[in-house]
Amino acid sequence: MKAADGSEPQKRRAGERAATAVEDGMVVGLGTGSTAAYAIRALGEAVADGLSITGIPTSYQSRALARSVGIELTTLETDLPDIAIDGADQLRLRDGCCIKGGGGAHTREKIVDSAADRCLIVVDETKLATTLDHPVAIELLEAGWPTVQSSLEALGGSVTLREATRKDGPVISDNGNLIADCTGLDDPASLAERIGSLAGIVDHGIFVDIADAVYVGTESDVTIHQVNK
Ligand code: 5RP
């Protein structure tokens, strides 16, 4: 599990409030990370109280949690999400652009979040930024590492493979690929398409035009920001 950061009470408020937007009969994209986990647990409680939903998980972690709290699961092969609830590592409120992938799940998160009719991003206040400068997670094929590294360096980035903490060698994603982290990119959102088109890249954690609303957990409440797309 990645290191915890941000405020747990704020994350909890944001996740639990977003879960109240889920209505009976909905198919729900289940994001990854500690903030999305609060939403999944709240949905599990609602299911125990009679709410009927099905979930599409974005990772091994969210699938296991959803199962453990009694949420029935489905896949994109048979259902499309009415709504998705997901976290972010850094978010720009002005346009809802965010950097994700701190947990290495951004590829499946992007698939599910973009397939949803509405994508709610849940964050604590520490995630908000006017300038996006969080390291960008990149999922890539092992064969592509040397060329992806040099292409990202040519864009001004500095890139390292994500190292596992309780295993020798690199982190391997749920999809069996490497994860690299790229720092130093000037305005990552404007580079999203270019980075996404590099040979060997599976996907990156820059989410542009995906969020429909942002739920920000604050000291005592939750502020909800609609994103104009
Ligand atoms: C996982 C993600 C997470 O949503 C992101 O890292 C935020 O996690 P947390 O809510 O634990 O801070 O993108 O790949």
Image (cartoon, rainbow, N blue to C red):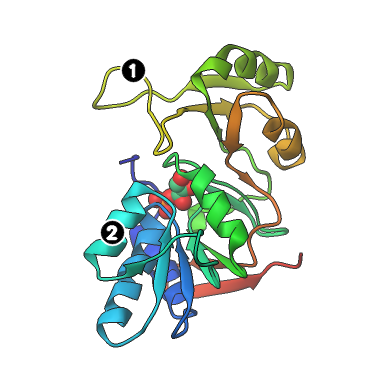
Residue at 39%, 49% in the rendered image? 59
Q: Quadrant of the C terminus?
A: bottom right
Q: Amino acid at mark 1?
A: Gly
Residue at 64%, 14% in the rendered image? 147
Looking at the image, residue 64 sits to the left or right of residue 194; the answer is: left
- Can residue 221 be seen by looking at this rendering? no
Looking at the image, residue 225 sits to the left or right of residue 84; the answer is: right
The x and y percentages for residue 154 are 73, 16
| Residue situated in front as seen by the camera: 69 or 229 | 69
Q: Which residue is mark 2?
A: 65
Residue at 58%, 33% in the rendered image? 202
Secondary structure of residue under mark 2? helix
Residue at 33%, 40% in the rendered image? 3
Name which of mark 1 and mark 2 comes first in the sequence.
Answer: 2
Label 1: how many Cα within 10 Å (few below 14, some 14–19, many 20+): few
The image quadrant of residue 121 is bottom right
Q: Is residue 132 above or below residue 39?
A: above
Q: Amino acid at mark 2?
A: Leu
Q: Quadrant of the N terminus?
A: top left
Secondary structure of residue under mark 1? loop
The x and y percentages for residue 196 are 68, 35
The x and y percentages for residue 17 are 44, 76
- Whether the residues at callouts 1 and 2 have beta carbons within 8 Å, the answer is no
Q: Is residue 198 above or below residue 5?
A: above
Is label 2's Cβ within 8 Å of ligand 1? no
Q: Is residue 147 above or below residue 88?
A: above
Q: Which residue is mark 1?
A: 169
